[in-house]
Image (cartoon, rainbow, N blue to C red):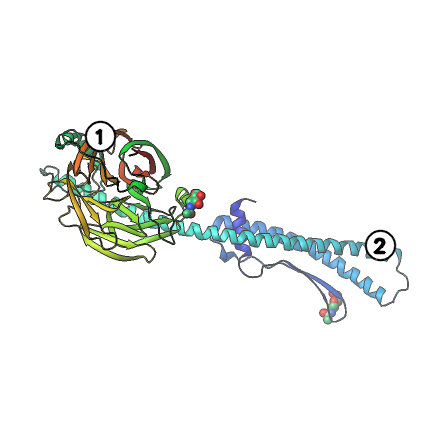
Amino acid sequence: MPAAQLLLLACLLGVGARTAQLRKANNQSGRCQYTFSVVSPTEASCPEQGQAMSAIQDLQRDSSAQREDLEATKARLTSLEGVLHRLTLGQVAEPSEAEQGQLDTLTREREQLETQTRELEAANSNLLRDQSVLEEEKRQLRAENEDLARRLESSSQEIERLRRGQCLQAHSSSQDMSPGAREVPRWNLENLDFQELKSELSEVPASQILARPTSGHPRSEDGDTGCGDLIWVGEPVTLRTAESITGKYGVWMRDPKPVSPYTQNTTWRIDTVGTAVRQVFEYHLISQFTQGYPSKVHVLPRPLESTGAVVYGGSLYFQGAASRTVVRYELKTESVKAQKDIPGAGYHGQFPYSWGGYTDIDLAVDETGLWVIYSTEEAKGAIVLSKLHPESLELEQTWETNIRKLSVANAFVICGTLYTVSSYSAPEATINFAYDTATESSKALSIPFKNHYKYSSMVDYNPLEKKLFAWDNFNMVTYDIRLSTM
Ligand SMILES: *[C@@H]1O[C@H](CO)[C@@H](O)[C@H](O)[C@H]1NC(C)=O
Ligand SMILES: *[C@@H]1O[C@H](CO)[C@@H](O)[C@H](O)[C@H]1NC(C)=O
Protein backbone atom coordinates (compact mmCIF):
# COMPACT_ATOMS: atom_id res chain seq x y z
CA MET A 1 0.00 0.00 0.00
CA PRO A 2 1.46 3.40 -0.90
CA ALA A 3 2.44 5.60 2.01
CA ALA A 4 -0.24 8.19 1.32
CA GLN A 5 -2.94 5.56 1.45
CA LEU A 6 -1.48 4.08 4.61
CA LEU A 7 -1.51 7.50 6.17
CA LEU A 8 -5.11 8.00 5.19
CA LEU A 9 -6.03 4.61 6.52
CA ALA A 10 -4.30 5.47 9.74
CA CYS A 11 -6.31 8.67 9.83
CA LEU A 12 -9.50 6.82 9.20
CA LEU A 13 -8.79 4.32 11.91
CA GLY A 14 -7.94 7.34 13.93
CA VAL A 15 -8.18 7.57 17.68
CA GLY A 16 -10.54 5.46 19.71
CA ALA A 17 -11.77 1.92 19.15
CA ARG A 18 -12.32 1.51 15.43
CA THR A 19 -12.17 -2.26 15.59
CA ALA A 20 -14.06 -4.51 13.23
CA GLN A 21 -16.02 -6.81 15.49
CA LEU A 22 -17.74 -10.14 15.13
CA ARG A 23 -20.19 -10.74 17.94
CA LYS A 24 -22.22 -13.79 18.81
CA ALA A 25 -25.18 -13.40 21.16
CA ASN A 26 -28.29 -15.26 22.24
CA ASN A 27 -31.47 -13.30 21.78
CA GLN A 28 -34.41 -13.63 24.03
CA SER A 29 -35.99 -16.47 22.15
CA GLY A 30 -32.82 -18.46 22.65
CA ARG A 31 -31.39 -18.08 19.14
CA CYS A 32 -27.85 -17.26 18.31
CA GLN A 33 -27.14 -14.04 16.42
CA TYR A 34 -23.91 -13.15 14.69
CA THR A 35 -23.26 -9.48 14.32
CA PHE A 36 -20.35 -8.05 12.33
CA SER A 37 -19.78 -4.37 12.70
CA VAL A 38 -17.24 -1.91 11.25
CA VAL A 39 -17.30 1.59 12.59
CA SER A 40 -17.76 3.96 9.69
CA PRO A 41 -14.86 6.26 8.87
CA THR A 42 -14.84 9.80 10.16
CA GLU A 43 -14.21 11.89 7.11
CA ALA A 44 -13.54 15.07 9.00
CA SER A 45 -10.33 13.68 10.53
CA CYS A 46 -8.40 13.84 7.25
CA PRO A 47 -6.91 16.94 5.78
CA GLU A 48 -6.25 16.28 2.07
CA GLN A 49 -9.62 16.70 0.38
CA GLY A 50 -9.31 15.14 -3.07
CA GLN A 51 -7.09 12.22 -2.20
CA ALA A 52 -8.88 11.63 1.05
CA MET A 53 -12.29 11.50 -0.57
CA SER A 54 -11.27 8.93 -3.17
CA ALA A 55 -9.53 6.83 -0.54
CA ILE A 56 -12.59 7.05 1.66
CA GLN A 57 -14.81 6.02 -1.26
CA ASP A 58 -12.55 3.03 -1.95
CA LEU A 59 -12.72 2.05 1.67
CA GLN A 60 -16.47 2.50 1.77
CA ARG A 61 -16.84 0.33 -1.32
CA ASP A 62 -14.63 -2.33 0.23
CA SER A 63 -16.44 -2.25 3.49
CA SER A 64 -19.92 -2.33 1.97
CA ALA A 65 -18.91 -5.33 -0.18
CA GLN A 66 -17.59 -6.98 2.96
CA ARG A 67 -20.76 -6.10 4.77
CA GLU A 68 -22.87 -7.71 2.04
CA ASP A 69 -20.81 -10.89 2.20
CA LEU A 70 -21.12 -10.94 5.92
CA GLU A 71 -24.87 -10.32 5.80
CA ALA A 72 -25.26 -13.34 3.54
CA THR A 73 -23.10 -15.48 5.81
CA LYS A 74 -24.97 -14.23 8.80
CA ALA A 75 -28.33 -15.16 7.28
CA ARG A 76 -27.09 -18.66 6.46
CA LEU A 77 -25.61 -19.05 9.89
CA THR A 78 -28.76 -17.93 11.61
CA SER A 79 -30.86 -20.42 9.71
CA LEU A 80 -28.36 -23.18 10.40
CA GLU A 81 -28.32 -22.17 14.01
CA GLY A 82 -32.05 -22.83 13.97
CA VAL A 83 -31.39 -26.39 12.82
CA LEU A 84 -28.79 -26.84 15.51
CA HIS A 85 -31.15 -25.50 18.11
CA ARG A 86 -33.83 -27.96 17.18
CA LEU A 87 -31.33 -30.76 17.24
CA THR A 88 -30.05 -29.99 20.68
CA LEU A 89 -33.57 -29.74 22.01
CA GLY A 90 -34.11 -33.25 20.74
CA GLN A 91 -36.99 -32.14 18.53
CA VAL A 92 -35.61 -34.38 15.85
CA ALA A 93 -34.22 -37.72 16.86
CA GLU A 94 -31.83 -38.12 14.02
CA PRO A 95 -30.52 -35.35 11.82
CA SER A 96 -31.43 -35.89 8.23
CA GLU A 97 -28.58 -36.25 5.77
CA ALA A 98 -29.29 -32.77 4.51
CA GLU A 99 -29.23 -31.42 8.02
CA GLN A 100 -25.98 -33.23 8.77
CA GLY A 101 -24.48 -31.68 5.64
CA GLN A 102 -25.65 -28.25 6.72
CA LEU A 103 -24.17 -28.83 10.14
CA ASP A 104 -20.77 -29.67 8.65
CA THR A 105 -20.96 -26.58 6.51
CA LEU A 106 -21.87 -24.55 9.57
CA THR A 107 -18.86 -25.85 11.48
CA ARG A 108 -16.53 -25.09 8.58
CA GLU A 109 -17.97 -21.63 8.14
CA ARG A 110 -17.67 -20.89 11.81
CA GLU A 111 -14.02 -21.92 11.75
CA GLN A 112 -13.49 -19.74 8.69
CA LEU A 113 -15.14 -16.81 10.39
CA GLU A 114 -13.01 -17.25 13.48
CA THR A 115 -9.86 -17.31 11.35
CA GLN A 116 -11.02 -14.19 9.52
CA THR A 117 -11.66 -12.49 12.83
CA ARG A 118 -8.17 -13.28 14.06
CA GLU A 119 -6.69 -11.98 10.81
CA LEU A 120 -8.74 -8.82 11.03
CA GLU A 121 -7.55 -8.26 14.58
CA ALA A 122 -3.91 -8.82 13.60
CA ALA A 123 -4.26 -6.45 10.65
CA ASN A 124 -5.84 -3.91 12.90
CA SER A 125 -3.05 -4.04 15.47
CA ASN A 126 -0.51 -3.62 12.65
CA LEU A 127 -2.45 -0.62 11.47
CA LEU A 128 -2.44 0.86 14.93
CA ARG A 129 1.33 0.42 15.09
CA ASP A 130 1.77 2.00 11.66
CA GLN A 131 -0.54 4.73 12.79
CA SER A 132 1.65 5.72 15.72
CA VAL A 133 4.75 5.74 13.48
CA LEU A 134 2.87 7.83 10.96
CA GLU A 135 1.61 10.20 13.59
CA GLU A 136 5.17 10.78 14.74
CA GLU A 137 6.14 11.49 11.13
CA LYS A 138 3.16 13.76 10.77
CA ARG A 139 4.26 15.65 13.86
CA GLN A 140 7.78 16.06 12.46
CA LEU A 141 6.43 17.14 9.09
CA ARG A 142 4.22 19.69 10.76
CA ALA A 143 7.18 21.08 12.71
CA GLU A 144 9.22 21.29 9.49
CA ASN A 145 6.31 22.89 7.77
CA GLU A 146 6.06 25.57 10.44
CA ASP A 147 9.77 26.12 10.24
CA LEU A 148 9.55 26.48 6.46
CA ALA A 149 6.66 28.89 6.80
CA ARG A 150 8.71 30.99 9.18
CA ARG A 151 11.64 31.01 6.77
CA LEU A 152 9.41 31.77 3.85
CA GLU A 153 8.06 34.69 5.83
CA SER A 154 11.54 35.99 6.53
CA SER A 155 12.58 35.46 2.89
CA SER A 156 9.56 37.44 1.74
CA GLN A 157 10.46 40.24 4.08
CA GLU A 158 14.01 40.04 2.78
CA ILE A 159 12.87 40.24 -0.83
CA GLU A 160 10.66 43.18 0.05
CA ARG A 161 13.57 44.84 1.80
CA LEU A 162 15.89 44.18 -1.11
CA ARG A 163 13.39 45.67 -3.50
CA ARG A 164 13.22 48.81 -1.42
CA GLY A 165 17.02 48.75 -0.99
CA GLN A 166 17.54 48.64 -4.74
CA CYS A 167 15.43 51.72 -5.19
CA LEU A 168 17.35 53.52 -2.49
CA GLN A 169 20.61 52.49 -4.10
CA ALA A 170 19.50 53.72 -7.48
CA HIS A 171 18.81 57.11 -5.96
CA SER A 172 22.10 57.35 -4.14
CA SER A 173 24.36 55.70 -6.69
CA SER A 174 25.88 58.97 -7.77
CA GLN A 175 27.05 59.76 -4.27
CA ASP A 176 30.67 59.26 -3.44
CA MET A 177 31.01 56.81 -0.60
CA SER A 178 33.98 56.98 1.70
CA PRO A 179 35.27 53.59 2.82
CA GLY A 180 34.60 54.01 6.51
CA ALA A 181 31.16 55.50 6.31
CA ARG A 182 29.80 53.70 3.30
CA GLU A 183 26.43 52.08 3.76
CA VAL A 184 26.66 48.67 2.17
CA PRO A 185 23.30 46.97 2.43
CA ARG A 186 24.44 43.73 3.94
CA TRP A 187 22.21 41.20 2.29
CA ASN A 188 21.77 42.83 -1.05
CA LEU A 189 22.70 40.07 -3.44
CA GLU A 190 23.32 42.70 -6.11
CA ASN A 191 26.38 43.65 -4.13
CA LEU A 192 28.14 40.32 -4.31
CA ASP A 193 30.17 41.23 -7.35
CA PHE A 194 31.20 44.43 -5.69
CA GLN A 195 32.39 42.58 -2.63
CA GLU A 196 34.33 40.05 -4.64
CA LEU A 197 36.03 42.73 -6.66
CA LYS A 198 36.89 44.57 -3.49
CA SER A 199 38.63 41.53 -2.08
CA GLU A 200 40.77 41.02 -5.14
CA LEU A 201 41.91 44.64 -5.03
CA SER A 202 42.65 44.76 -1.36
CA GLU A 203 44.67 41.58 -1.22
CA VAL A 204 47.62 43.05 -3.03
CA PRO A 205 48.49 45.88 -0.69
CA ALA A 206 47.78 43.69 2.33
CA SER A 207 51.13 41.92 2.13
CA GLN A 208 52.90 45.26 2.25
CA ILE A 209 51.44 46.02 5.66
CA LEU A 210 53.63 43.43 7.29
CA ALA A 211 56.71 45.04 8.67
CA ARG A 212 58.04 43.00 11.52
CA PRO A 213 59.74 39.73 10.73
CA THR A 214 58.81 36.54 12.47
CA SER A 215 60.57 35.78 15.69
CA GLY A 216 60.48 32.89 18.09
CA HIS A 217 58.05 29.99 18.33
CA PRO A 218 54.70 29.47 19.99
CA ARG A 219 55.13 28.76 23.68
CA SER A 220 55.27 25.15 24.66
CA GLU A 221 53.04 25.48 27.73
CA ASP A 222 50.31 23.61 25.85
CA GLY A 223 52.45 20.54 25.39
CA ASP A 224 49.65 18.08 26.09
CA THR A 225 47.12 19.78 23.82
CA GLY A 226 49.11 18.88 20.72
CA CYS A 227 49.82 22.49 19.86
CA GLY A 228 52.00 23.65 17.02
CA ASP A 229 52.08 25.89 13.96
CA LEU A 230 49.54 25.37 11.23
CA ILE A 231 51.39 23.78 8.30
CA TRP A 232 48.70 22.20 6.10
CA VAL A 233 44.98 22.45 5.36
CA GLY A 234 43.22 19.56 3.61
CA GLU A 235 40.45 19.46 1.04
CA PRO A 236 37.01 20.64 2.16
CA VAL A 237 34.56 17.89 3.07
CA THR A 238 30.89 18.85 2.60
CA LEU A 239 28.59 17.73 5.41
CA ARG A 240 25.41 19.56 4.63
CA THR A 241 23.91 22.00 2.13
CA ALA A 242 21.46 24.66 3.26
CA GLU A 243 17.94 24.35 1.89
CA SER A 244 17.05 27.97 1.17
CA ILE A 245 18.39 31.42 0.41
CA THR A 246 18.62 32.17 4.14
CA GLY A 247 21.48 29.67 4.19
CA LYS A 248 23.78 31.38 1.68
CA TYR A 249 25.78 32.66 4.65
CA GLY A 250 25.80 31.19 8.08
CA VAL A 251 27.69 29.68 10.95
CA TRP A 252 27.73 26.15 12.30
CA MET A 253 29.60 24.86 15.30
CA ARG A 254 30.23 22.19 17.90
CA ASP A 255 31.35 22.68 21.46
CA PRO A 256 35.04 21.83 22.02
CA LYS A 257 34.31 21.83 25.78
CA PRO A 258 30.87 20.20 25.87
CA VAL A 259 28.71 20.42 28.97
CA SER A 260 25.83 18.02 29.77
CA PRO A 261 23.23 17.51 28.28
CA TYR A 262 25.32 18.24 25.18
CA THR A 263 28.12 16.13 23.75
CA GLN A 264 30.97 16.78 21.38
CA ASN A 265 28.58 15.62 18.66
CA THR A 266 25.87 18.18 19.35
CA THR A 267 25.85 20.58 16.42
CA TRP A 268 24.36 24.06 16.15
CA ARG A 269 23.61 25.96 12.98
CA ILE A 270 22.51 29.53 12.30
CA ASP A 271 21.47 30.72 8.84
CA THR A 272 22.45 34.38 8.88
CA VAL A 273 20.85 35.84 5.76
CA GLY A 274 18.14 38.17 6.97
CA THR A 275 17.57 41.23 9.06
CA ALA A 276 16.47 39.69 12.35
CA VAL A 277 18.46 36.50 12.76
CA ARG A 278 17.35 34.76 15.94
CA GLN A 279 16.97 31.08 15.15
CA VAL A 280 19.58 28.58 16.30
CA PHE A 281 19.07 25.01 15.12
CA GLU A 282 20.31 22.36 17.49
CA TYR A 283 21.09 18.80 16.38
CA HIS A 284 21.72 16.25 19.08
CA LEU A 285 23.25 13.71 16.72
CA ILE A 286 25.60 14.25 13.82
CA SER A 287 23.21 12.28 11.63
CA GLN A 288 20.40 14.71 12.49
CA PHE A 289 22.66 17.55 11.39
CA THR A 290 23.63 15.91 8.11
CA GLN A 291 20.01 14.94 7.39
CA GLY A 292 18.61 18.30 8.45
CA TYR A 293 16.37 17.28 11.36
CA PRO A 294 16.94 19.66 14.26
CA SER A 295 16.22 18.31 17.72
CA LYS A 296 15.51 21.82 18.94
CA VAL A 297 15.21 25.36 17.65
CA HIS A 298 16.35 28.13 19.97
CA VAL A 299 14.95 31.61 19.47
CA LEU A 300 17.49 34.10 20.76
CA PRO A 301 16.28 36.88 23.04
CA ARG A 302 17.89 39.39 20.64
CA PRO A 303 18.91 39.12 16.99
CA LEU A 304 22.52 38.43 16.12
CA GLU A 305 24.88 39.84 13.54
CA SER A 306 27.89 38.40 11.74
CA THR A 307 28.92 34.80 11.21
CA GLY A 308 31.23 35.03 14.21
CA ALA A 309 29.25 33.02 16.76
CA VAL A 310 30.83 30.12 18.70
CA VAL A 311 29.68 27.54 21.24
CA TYR A 312 31.98 26.97 24.19
CA GLY A 313 31.38 25.34 27.57
CA GLY A 314 27.62 25.03 26.98
CA SER A 315 27.07 28.66 25.95
CA LEU A 316 26.55 30.31 22.59
CA TYR A 317 28.57 33.51 22.23
CA PHE A 318 27.40 35.95 19.59
CA GLN A 319 27.48 39.60 18.56
CA GLY A 320 24.16 41.36 19.14
CA ALA A 321 22.78 42.98 15.97
CA ALA A 322 23.84 46.58 15.32
CA SER A 323 25.95 46.73 18.47
CA ARG A 324 29.45 46.01 19.74
CA THR A 325 27.95 43.78 22.41
CA VAL A 326 29.03 40.18 22.83
CA VAL A 327 26.29 38.06 24.38
CA ARG A 328 26.73 34.81 26.30
CA TYR A 329 23.59 32.71 25.93
CA GLU A 330 23.50 29.54 27.98
CA LEU A 331 21.94 26.88 25.77
CA LYS A 332 20.65 24.54 28.46
CA THR A 333 18.70 27.22 30.34
CA GLU A 334 18.04 29.27 27.20
CA SER A 335 19.00 32.43 29.02
CA VAL A 336 21.50 35.26 28.67
CA LYS A 337 24.19 34.89 31.34
CA ALA A 338 26.41 37.83 30.42
CA GLN A 339 26.79 40.58 27.85
CA LYS A 340 29.56 43.04 27.37
CA ASP A 341 30.55 45.76 24.94
CA ILE A 342 33.93 45.28 23.29
CA PRO A 343 35.50 48.73 23.87
CA GLY A 344 35.86 50.72 20.66
CA ALA A 345 35.03 47.75 18.42
CA GLY A 346 33.69 48.68 15.01
CA TYR A 347 30.35 47.12 14.14
CA HIS A 348 27.63 47.02 11.52
CA GLY A 349 29.94 47.26 8.53
CA GLN A 350 32.71 49.46 9.90
CA PHE A 351 35.48 46.85 9.96
CA PRO A 352 34.15 43.69 8.33
CA TYR A 353 36.18 41.00 6.59
CA SER A 354 36.61 41.45 2.86
CA TRP A 355 33.36 39.67 1.99
CA GLY A 356 31.29 42.13 4.01
CA GLY A 357 28.25 40.71 5.74
CA TYR A 358 28.72 42.90 8.86
CA THR A 359 31.44 40.51 10.00
CA ASP A 360 32.94 43.14 12.28
CA ILE A 361 33.12 41.04 15.43
CA ASP A 362 34.25 37.44 15.10
CA LEU A 363 34.48 35.09 18.08
CA ALA A 364 36.94 32.22 18.16
CA VAL A 365 37.90 29.29 20.38
CA ASP A 366 41.25 27.57 20.58
CA GLU A 367 43.08 25.26 22.97
CA THR A 368 43.55 28.14 25.39
CA GLY A 369 40.02 29.53 25.53
CA LEU A 370 37.75 32.20 24.08
CA TRP A 371 38.86 35.05 21.77
CA VAL A 372 37.30 37.97 19.97
CA ILE A 373 38.65 39.27 16.66
CA TYR A 374 37.66 42.83 15.68
CA SER A 375 39.09 46.28 14.91
CA THR A 376 38.84 49.81 16.24
CA GLU A 377 39.20 53.40 15.01
CA GLU A 378 42.32 53.56 17.12
CA ALA A 379 43.85 50.56 15.36
CA LYS A 380 42.81 52.10 12.02
CA GLY A 381 41.20 48.91 10.80
CA ALA A 382 44.02 46.55 11.80
CA ILE A 383 42.90 43.30 13.43
CA VAL A 384 42.69 43.54 17.21
CA LEU A 385 42.59 40.32 19.18
CA SER A 386 41.36 39.99 22.77
CA LYS A 387 41.21 37.07 25.14
CA LEU A 388 37.78 36.94 26.83
CA HIS A 389 36.85 35.50 30.19
CA PRO A 390 34.31 32.84 29.19
CA GLU A 391 31.93 33.55 32.07
CA SER A 392 32.04 37.29 32.57
CA LEU A 393 33.21 38.27 29.07
CA GLU A 394 35.81 40.58 30.65
CA LEU A 395 38.71 41.37 28.32
CA GLU A 396 41.71 39.62 29.82
CA GLN A 397 44.37 40.72 27.37
CA THR A 398 44.47 42.53 24.03
CA TRP A 399 46.86 42.43 21.07
CA GLU A 400 46.91 44.79 18.12
CA THR A 401 48.13 43.14 14.93
CA ASN A 402 49.32 44.78 11.74
CA ILE A 403 46.94 42.86 9.48
CA ARG A 404 44.21 45.00 7.99
CA LYS A 405 40.87 43.36 8.73
CA LEU A 406 39.21 44.46 5.48
CA SER A 407 42.03 42.89 3.49
CA VAL A 408 41.46 39.34 4.66
CA ALA A 409 38.45 37.06 4.16
CA ASN A 410 38.36 35.48 7.60
CA ALA A 411 40.42 34.63 10.67
CA PHE A 412 40.66 31.94 13.32
CA VAL A 413 42.92 31.14 16.25
CA ILE A 414 44.94 27.96 16.80
CA CYS A 415 47.16 27.56 19.86
CA GLY A 416 47.21 31.30 20.56
CA THR A 417 48.13 32.22 16.98
CA LEU A 418 45.73 34.10 14.73
CA TYR A 419 45.60 32.92 11.11
CA THR A 420 43.94 34.75 8.22
CA VAL A 421 42.43 33.54 4.94
CA SER A 422 43.43 35.48 1.81
CA SER A 423 40.17 35.30 -0.14
CA TYR A 424 36.63 34.12 0.41
CA SER A 425 35.97 33.51 -3.28
CA ALA A 426 39.17 32.41 -5.02
CA PRO A 427 39.02 28.63 -5.46
CA GLU A 428 42.73 28.43 -4.70
CA ALA A 429 43.15 30.79 -1.76
CA THR A 430 45.75 30.66 1.00
CA ILE A 431 46.21 31.04 4.71
CA ASN A 432 48.23 34.18 4.23
CA PHE A 433 49.23 35.57 7.64
CA ALA A 434 49.85 34.36 11.15
CA TYR A 435 50.01 36.58 14.23
CA ASP A 436 51.52 34.88 17.27
CA THR A 437 50.27 36.35 20.55
CA ALA A 438 53.22 34.84 22.43
CA THR A 439 55.84 36.68 20.38
CA GLU A 440 53.48 39.52 19.35
CA SER A 441 54.68 39.18 15.78
CA SER A 442 53.25 38.44 12.36
CA LYS A 443 54.56 36.48 9.46
CA ALA A 444 53.36 35.87 5.92
CA LEU A 445 52.34 32.35 5.01
CA SER A 446 51.16 30.62 1.88
CA ILE A 447 49.30 27.52 2.95
CA PRO A 448 46.82 26.47 0.24
CA PHE A 449 43.16 26.83 1.27
CA LYS A 450 40.33 25.91 -1.11
CA ASN A 451 37.07 27.85 -1.38
CA HIS A 452 35.35 24.98 -3.12
CA TYR A 453 32.00 26.77 -3.53
CA LYS A 454 33.63 30.20 -3.94
CA TYR A 455 31.92 32.02 -1.07
CA SER A 456 33.31 31.27 2.37
CA SER A 457 31.48 33.38 4.90
CA MET A 458 32.71 31.67 8.06
CA VAL A 459 35.93 29.84 8.98
CA ASP A 460 36.45 28.65 12.56
CA TYR A 461 38.79 26.26 14.30
CA ASN A 462 37.46 23.46 16.51
CA PRO A 463 40.29 22.55 18.90
CA LEU A 464 38.62 19.31 20.02
CA GLU A 465 38.25 17.88 16.53
CA LYS A 466 41.36 19.70 15.30
CA LYS A 467 39.51 20.71 12.16
CA LEU A 468 38.42 23.91 10.49
CA PHE A 469 34.64 24.36 10.19
CA ALA A 470 33.47 26.61 7.38
CA TRP A 471 30.35 27.83 5.60
CA ASP A 472 30.96 28.08 1.88
CA ASN A 473 28.05 29.26 -0.27
CA PHE A 474 25.20 27.26 1.33
CA ASN A 475 27.57 24.43 2.25
CA MET A 476 28.77 23.41 5.69
CA VAL A 477 32.24 21.97 5.30
CA THR A 478 35.21 20.81 7.36
CA TYR A 479 38.93 20.84 6.61
CA ASP A 480 41.49 18.57 8.18
CA ILE A 481 44.59 20.39 9.30
CA ARG A 482 48.12 19.53 10.35
CA LEU A 483 50.14 21.27 13.02
CA SER A 484 53.90 21.13 13.32
CA THR A 485 55.12 19.02 16.22
CA MET A 486 57.55 20.66 18.55
C1 LIG B 1 -34.52 -13.74 17.93
O1 LIG B 1 -34.04 -14.03 16.64
C2 LIG B 1 -34.96 -14.59 15.73
C3 LIG B 1 -34.24 -14.92 14.42
O2 LIG B 1 -33.58 -13.81 13.90
C4 LIG B 1 -36.10 -13.59 15.53
O3 LIG B 1 -37.09 -14.12 14.70
C5 LIG B 1 -36.71 -13.21 16.87
O4 LIG B 1 -37.68 -12.22 16.73
C6 LIG B 1 -35.64 -12.71 17.83
N1 LIG B 1 -36.21 -12.46 19.13
C7 LIG B 1 -36.07 -11.33 19.80
C8 LIG B 1 -36.79 -11.22 21.08
O5 LIG B 1 -35.33 -10.40 19.36
C1 LIG C 1 29.50 10.74 18.51
O1 LIG C 1 29.05 10.13 17.32
C2 LIG C 1 29.78 8.99 16.94
C3 LIG C 1 29.23 8.49 15.63
O2 LIG C 1 28.60 9.47 14.91
C4 LIG C 1 29.69 7.93 18.01
O3 LIG C 1 30.48 6.83 17.66
C5 LIG C 1 30.15 8.51 19.33
O4 LIG C 1 29.95 7.57 20.36
C6 LIG C 1 29.39 9.78 19.66
N1 LIG C 1 29.93 10.37 20.86
C7 LIG C 1 29.17 10.86 21.84
C8 LIG C 1 29.87 11.45 23.00
O5 LIG C 1 27.95 10.82 21.79
Relative to 460, say whether 315 is above or below. below
Q: Which mark is residue 101?
A: 2
Count residues near mark 1 (Cα–Cα under 10 Å), then give few for <14, some for 14-19, many for 20+: some
Q: Position of residue 136 (x, y in %)?
A: 48, 52
Q: Position of residue 83 (x, y in %)?
A: 82, 62
Q: Position of residue 220 (x, y in %)?
A: 26, 39
Residue 422 appearing in the image: no
Q: Nearer the viewer, residue 455 or 464?
A: 464
Q: Nearer the viewer, residue 426 or 6?
A: 426
Ligand 1 falls in quadrant:
bottom right
Dot 1 amino acid type = Leu
- Precedes in sequence: disc 2 or disc 1: 2
Q: CB under 8 Å between callouts 2 and 1? A: no
Count residues near mark 2 (Cα–Cα under 10 Å), then give few for <14, some for 14-19, many for 20+: few
Number of marks in the rendered image: 2
SS class, disc 2: helix
SS class, disc 1: strand
Q: Quadrant of residue 392?
A: bottom left
Q: Quadrant of residue 432?
A: top left
Residue drawn where x is 77% and y is 69% of the image:
30
Q: Which residue is mark 1?
A: 445
Judged left or right of residue 249, residue 285 is: right
Residue drawn where x is 49% and y is 57% of the image:
44
Residue 266 appearing in the image: yes
Relative to 268, say whether 14 is above or below. below
Q: Position of residue 404 (x, y in %)?
A: 15, 37
Judged left or right of residue 116, residue 304 is: left
